[in-house]
């Protein structure tokens, strides 16, 4: 009888340890997944910011060189199209990179919802983008 209780206690302890280990590993994995979402979206947003600045700079140079309004408007239209395509494609590629099991964990589905998600995690994104500058 004594060995049966020892064995049952050992098995119960072992299973409890495994359950807590699994819970901790799952929680850590989900936190890492969310952190990668924030980091990826922060990088995409930063790239779009630079792309927009390039657009403004190019338009200023066109105005300074007396380009026609038609050419300036055409450039603006083409770059806005490119920015819109990049936004849509970048978020879709980020979503498509996940296996089916993890798709339910993604908290955004398009650019607008991705920016809301990024805004709710802006402290981490700011820390990620500035890391190394203060270290």
Image (cartoon, rainbow, N blue to C red):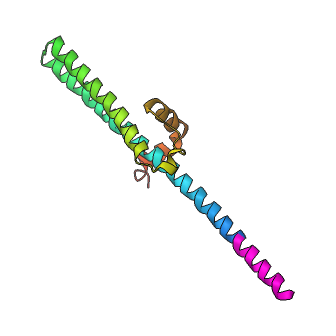
What percent of the width, then of the height, locates residue 34?
52, 48
Image label count: 0
Residue drawn at the location 49% of the way across and 32% of the way down: 113
Q: What predominant SS class does the magenta segment belong to?
A: helix
When the figure is inspected, residue 60 is found, relative to residue 38, above or below; the finding is above
Q: Is residue 20 left or right of residue 89?
A: right
Q: Is residue 133 left or right of residue 5?
A: left
Residue drawn at the location 68% of the way across and 65% of the way down: 20
Q: Is residue 72 left or right of residue 23?
A: left
Residue at the right extreme of this rendering: 1
Q: Is residue 53 left or right of residue 15?
A: left
- State which quadrant residue 90 falls in: top left
Is residue 4 found inside the magenta-colored segment of the image?
yes
When the figure is inspected, residue 109 is found, relative to residue 58, above or below; the finding is below
Is residue 124 found inside the magenta-colored segment of the image?
no
Instruction: Pick whichever, 72 or 98, lies toward us.
Output: 98
Residue at the top extreme of this rendering: 69
Residue drawn at the location 82% of the way across and 84% of the way down: 4
When the figure is inspected, residue 40 is found, relative to residue 19, above or below; the finding is above
Q: In the rendered image, which quarter contains the C terminus? A: bottom left
Q: In the rendered image, which quarter contains the N terminus? A: bottom right
Residue drawn at the location 25% of the way across and 31% of the way down: 54
What percent of the width, then of the height, locates residue 42?
42, 41
What percent of the width, then of the height, locates residue 5?
83, 82
Q: Which residues are magenta?
A: 1-15
What percent of the width, then of the height, locates residue 22?
62, 64
When the figure is inspected, residue 28 is found, relative to residue 127, above or below; the finding is below
């Amino acid at each position: 009888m004594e060995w049966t209780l020892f064995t049952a206690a050992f098995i119960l302890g072992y299973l409890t340890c495994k359950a807590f280990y699994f819970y901790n590993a799952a929680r850590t994995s989900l936190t890492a997944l969310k952190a990668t979402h924030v980091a990826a979206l922060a990088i995409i947003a930063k790239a779009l910011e630079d792309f927009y600045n390039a657009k403004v700079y190019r338009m200023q140079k066109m105005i300074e060189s007396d380009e026609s309004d038609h050419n300036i408007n055409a450039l603006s239209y083409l770059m806005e199209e490119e920015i819109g395509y990049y936004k849509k494609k970048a978020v879709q590629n980020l979503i498509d990179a996940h296996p089916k099991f993890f798709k339910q964990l993604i908290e955004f589905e398009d650019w607008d919802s991705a920016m809301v998600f990024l805004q709710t995690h802006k402290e981490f994104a700011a820390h990620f983008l500035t890391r190394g500058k203060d270290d």
